[in-house]
Amino acid sequence: MIGGIDINIFDNYNDIKNELKLFKQRLKLIEKYEKKVNYERKTLNEIIVLQTNLLHQIEDDIKKLSGIENELYCEIVVNGIKVSKAIEKIATEENISVSTLWKNYYPSVKKRINALNLILSNENKENILN
């Protein structure tokens, strides 16, 4: 004790004052981070809406394309039907044999699907690396 005052009271005062300063600084950092996160969230949501609309427009355009290869591609990629079921469906609609579709049309459709899959897998690899 010094002059009737406990020394620990000064230590406690300084500790609390320093902690308070640190808490205020941390709160400012969190608020700054929140603004950045909110901005990024807003930007990503806008991009998602734009990309979704664009994707729907492209899907609609693909569905309007004529030709057996385009119809087959649309059934497989856009509508998500398994290849064998898509071939059966197109064969029925176009009155063509299933074997003709497999032999004469599916190989070129498969190339387009593989090219799309390659692009998607490369994008996924880049996303994982970043």
Image: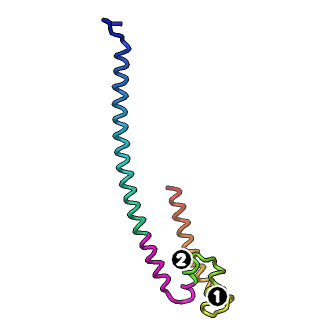
What kind of secondary structure does the magenta stretch mostly adopt?
helix
Is mark 1 in CB contact (under 8 Å) with mark 2? no
On the image, the x and y values in percent for residue 112 come to 56, 78
**How busy is the neighbourhood of tag 1: few (under 14 within 10 Å), some, or many (20 plus)?**
some
| Mark whose residue sits in front, 1 or 2 | 2
Q: Is residue 67 magenta?
A: yes
Q: Secondary structure at mark 2?
A: helix
On the image, the x and y values in percent for residue 105 come to 61, 87
The residue labelled by disc 1 is 101
Q: Is residue 65 above or below residue 39?
A: below
Measuring 51% from the left and 89% from the top, which residue is drawn there?
66
The residue labelled by disc 2 is 78
On the image, the x and y values in percent for residue 60 come to 46, 80
| Nearest to the observer: residue 111 or residue 43 | 43
The amino acid pointed to by label 2 is Val
Residue furthest right as drawn: 99
Residue furthest left as drawn: 3
Q: Residue 31 — which label? A: none
> Bounds of the magenta span?
52-71
